[in-house]
Amino acid sequence: MFQNIIEVLILSAIQGISEFLPISSSAHLILYAGILSGGFAFVLQIYAQRNITPAPAAIIFSLEGVFATIAAWFILNQILDVNNLLGCFFILCGVLLSQLLPLIKKKYT
């Protein structure tokens, strides 16, 4: 709720500024995407990274491509080819192996 209010305020401010700038009519959309995805999301990422241990942070960041691929398929109806699916599969397998192998070693030693 609070984030939506902030987004609306930022977008309206950017839209008001872009009306006076001699650039294209889509400038407010470009500025909106740049500020919120590049700036606001980056600040939230840094804040979240400080509050968790390094191992879960590394897992989340290594799965970023998988999340992006699933979101593109689900939200944008993007068609995934074999390379995309194999890449997601290998990333998931690598993350699972990196987390399960120490547990398996601990169990058998």
Image (cartoon, rainbow, N blue to C red):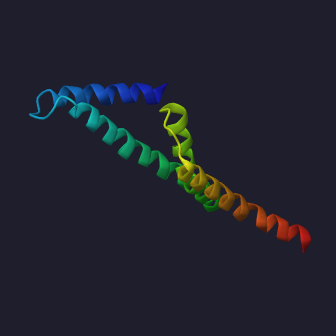
User: Which residue is at a point 77% across and 66% down the rendered structure image?
Assistant: 101
Q: Quadrant of residue 100?
A: bottom right
Residue 23, image quadrant: top left
Who's the residue at 38% across and 29% down the image?
A: 6
**In terms of depth relative to the viewer, which is nearer, 52 or 29?**
29
* Horizontal side of residue 13 vs 94, given as left or right: left
The answer to whether residue 3 is above or below residue 34 is above
In the image, taking residue 31 as reference, residue 69 lies left or right, namely: right
| Front-lying residue, 76 or 61 | 76
Q: Position of residue 4 (x, y in %)?
A: 43, 26
Describe residue 57's horizontal placement relative to residue 25 as left or right: right
Which quadrant is the C terminus positioned in? bottom right
Q: Residue furthest front?
A: 82
Does residue 69 sit above or below 96 in this rendering?
Answer: above
Residue 72: image location, x then y, percent = 50, 38
Percent x, y of residue 98:
70, 64
Closest to the observer, 21 or 96: 96
Q: Position of residue 99 (x, y in %)?
A: 73, 61
Q: For the view shown, which residue lies furthest in the right direction?
A: 108
Q: Is residue 60 left or right of residue 3?
A: right
Of all residues shown, which one is farthest toward the bottom?
A: 109
Residue 28, quarter of picture:
top left
The residue at the point 31 percent across, 35 percent down is 32
**Number of marks in the image?**
0
